Amino acid sequence: MAAQEKRKSLQGLWSSRLVFILAVSGSAVGLGNIWKFPYIAGDNGGGAFVLVYLVCVFTIGLPIMMSEILIGRRGRRNPIMTMKIVGEEEAGQSWWQIVGISGVLAGFLILSFYSVVAGWALAYIFKSATGTFHGIDGPGVEKVFGDLTGNWQILMMWHTLFMLMTVGVVARGVQRGLEQAVRVLMPALVGLLLILFVYAINHGAFVEALNFMFRADFDRLTADSVLVALGHAFFTLSLGMGAVMAYGAYLPEGTSILSTSIAVVFADTIIALLAGMVIFPIVFAHGLDAGQGPGLIFQTLPLAFGQMTGGVIFGTMFFVLLSFAAWTSSIGLIEPAVAWLTERFHMQRPQAAWLVGGITWVLGVGSVLSFNLLADFKIWRPGKDPGTIFDSLDHLASNLMLPLGGLLIAVFAGWVMCQNATSEELDIGDGGIYKLWRFLTRVVAPAMVLLIFLRGVGLI
Ligand code: PFF
């Protein structure tokens, strides 16, 4: 315990609890909520998928988020060193650092394709602002999207710009600038989603959309879609890869981990559901296909912007905010690797950020080419049809690495760490809520992840 009291964060601390909530929500709320959730819900048949996703978020995601924060604050280092230090302290085992290593790798993989999609959002800012969507129809939006993704040089340019933006912020240190941005931008994003929501209620096929999203038809649920729902619960909450653990390392003592985690999980879930309730009414009102894949929001929202008064302004603002949401998330993806390089090898923060950004940029080229030159190059995936480089990176990182990372984190917090340590960090006494957290972390989360995982990859 004495060692624990002496250990200080090497990168400074968040200035308040609110800032920490904003930073974790900034990492959680991103393309996952607005781009990915609607399209995978559409691909996997809607209602039953949404239900499984919600169950995963609250019974697995919430306790694991608490675990990541408490481990991070206990170790006060980057995820690799934190897992090593706390593993040694609690059980004399240093091999737990493998969880941090896999997390850092997952961060590289995810950011490499995330940056490409964030590049689409950047491109759409200019398209909206220059009136491209004015009065556009279904085939029109498909063509705009197809022309963008079909051109690898243009995609490359946007991907490069987004990586430069990410590295630029991380190089300066996360606290300055980013905190301010998140404080203003997150409420603005929600405000704009609400405006679109009102539009969708008035002009979209709202009832049909609600039926699609909330009527659970379990016949459409396959083992693979349950795995996708689980993977998405981790992805959307930024769990299973040490991002939240890295942020937890900068959390002042005495800040409540329980209430912070609940706030983040609710905010994230509400934004995803809101995005779905904006997008599906437009999909059904225009006879579009809900299962059209990654292009879904880029081919539905412009239809709404093209028809509404003030659409140019709303459309531009929307894609600006979407890009910001992606930006605050991409910083969470790169932070574990950057913190590791600075703490372990005493690299300067800017150098570490450029190195990580450079490697990720190169990896991202594979995803850029997946939509054009290499569209027919398909890779084998466990439990799934072969997919493009883009699809395969997403599947490997989100559906396999994050759940496995999360499983190990739950086992670590629930079984390896002693009860005194976890109850002291959580600081909620040893009553019902602590017992519930411990039960979910020791039994429910590991068992569910393991079952879904093995079934999803076809091993049981
Ligand atoms: N949670 C982000 C989203 O939903 O877009 C994605 C993400 C960010 C995953 C940061 C992991 C992470 F560390």
Image (cartoon, rainbow, N blue to C red):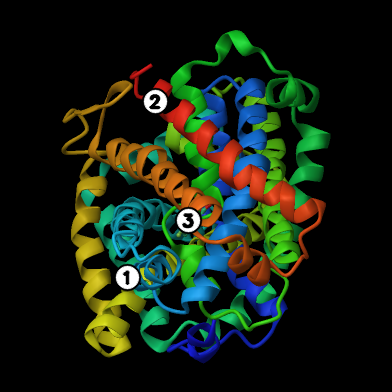
The earlier-in-sequence mark between 1 and 3 is 1
Residue type at mark 2: give it. Leu
Residue type at mark 1: give it. Ala
Residue type at mark 3: give it. Val
Seen in the image, is 158 located left or right of residue 290?
left
Does residue 386 lie above or below 245 as drawn?
Answer: above
Residue 390 shows which numbered tag? none
The earlier-in-sequence mark between 2 and 1 is 1
Q: Nearer the viewer, mark 2 or mark 3?
A: 3
Which residue, given by chain and number where applicable, does mark 3 sit on? 416
Identify the secondary structure beneath mark 3.
Answer: helix
Crowd around label 3: few <14 · some 14–19 · many ≥20 (10 Å): some
Work out which residue is located at the far top of the displayed protein and give it. 219
Q: Nearer the viewer, mark 1 or mark 3?
A: 3
Mark-to-mark CA distance, 2 and 1: 29 Å
Determine which quarter of the picture holds residue 158. bottom left
Which residue, given by chain and number where applicable, does mark 2 sit on? 454
Query: Which residue: 56% across, 24% down?
Result: 290
